[in-house]
């Protein structure tokens, strides 16, 4: 088992956090949210993982960085803010994100809605490195799901999330093994 320390950043319900915590509980040493009442913080507290609320706004990446000393890998799990300098340079190839589409298709918000509006026959999810763009970094792992004729945005997102919970831990395991 790697001794590398992981911080998770999220804004929402935290189902990807839970999937990661099932496999890397002892290595997740901090969970940060920009939303004070985000469910992800409650889920982390339930597992006795230290949490922090860092509100969005000016110098967010600088403020996040000041809390990340000793962290080896940052996993964005539904974190709805862009990561900027100086955080990017402080963690080169050490910030990962999960996105609910087969990037480069459907970057940005509500990718599952974009897939339905586009009449896509398949969609999926992507784990990728984070760079200065929105959902543009180098792709690490993807999983496909079908888009069914009677899908609603909710049913498609649920199908995508099942795959997210499989590929995110898999990608993190691979990246941890490669970290020096
Ligand atoms: C996930 O579907 C994730 O892919 C998406 O937010 C959801 C968070 O769910 N992220 C993005 O859209 C990032 N552009 P969770 O809080 O249950 O893990």
Image: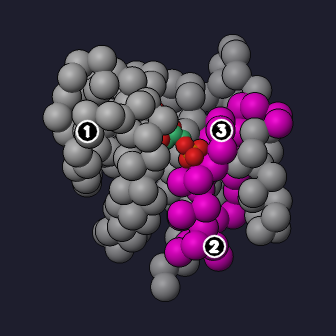
Quarter of the picture holding the C terminus: bottom left
15 relative to 98 in the view: left or right: right
Name the residue at 25% across, 34% down.
149
- Find residue 147 and name its label: 1
Q: Is residue 107 above or below residue 30?
A: above
Image coordinates of residue 55 in percent, x first then y, are 76, 26
Q: Looking at the image, which residue sits at the far left?
A: 121
Q: Could one spot residue 131 in this view of the protein?
A: no
Number of other residues with Cα within 10 Å of mark 3, as a class: few under 14, some 14 to 19, many 20 or more: many
Q: Is residue 92 above or below residue 117?
A: below
Marks 3, 2: nearer the viewer: 3
Name the residue at 38% across, 47% down.
160
- Find residue 112 and name its label: none
Marks 2/1: CA distance? 33 Å
* The image quarter in which residue 105 lies: top left
Q: Which residues are magenta?
A: 8-37
Marks 3/1: CA distance? 24 Å
**Nearest to the observer: residue 157 or residue 176:** 157
**Nearest to the observer: residue 152 or residue 125:** 152
Number of other residues with Cα within 10 Å of mark 2, as a class: few under 14, some 14 to 19, many 20 or more: some
Q: Could one spot residue 36 in this view of the protein?
A: yes
Magenta highlight on residue 30: yes
Q: Mark 3 or 1 closer to N-term? A: 3
Decide: marks 3, 1 in contact (CB < 8 A)? no
Q: Is residue 158 above or below residue 64?
A: below
Image coordinates of residue 141 in percent, x first then y, are 25, 54
- Find residue 12 and name its label: 3
Magenta highlight on residue 21: yes
Q: Which residue in the structure is indicated by mark 2?
A: 25
Q: Does the beta carbon of the residue at mark 3 sit less than 8 Å from ligand 1?
A: yes
Disc 3 on helix, strand or loop?
loop
């Amino acid at each position: 088992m790697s001794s590398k320390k992981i911080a998770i950043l999220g804004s929402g319900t935290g189902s990807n956090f839970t999937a990661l915590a099932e496999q890397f509980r002892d290595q997740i040493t901090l969970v940060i949210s920009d939303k004070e009442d985000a469910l992800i913080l409650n889920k982390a507290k339930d597992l006795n993982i230290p949490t922090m609320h860092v509100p969005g706004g000016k110098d967010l990446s600088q403020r996040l960085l000041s809390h990340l000393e000793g962290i080896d890998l940052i996993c964005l799990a539904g974190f709805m803010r862009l990561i900027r300098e100086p955080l990017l340079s402080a963690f080169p190839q050490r910030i990962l994100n999960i996105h609910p589409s087969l990037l480069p298709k459907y970057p940005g918000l509500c990718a599952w809605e974009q897939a339905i509006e586009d009449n896509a026959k398949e969609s999926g999810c992507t784990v990728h490195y984070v760079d200065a763009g929105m959902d543009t970094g180098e792709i690490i792992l993807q999983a496909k799901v079908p888009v069914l004729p009677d899908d609603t945005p909710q049913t498609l997102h649920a199908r995508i999330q099942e795959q997210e919970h499989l590929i995110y831990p898999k990608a993190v395991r691979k990246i941890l093994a490669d970290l020096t």
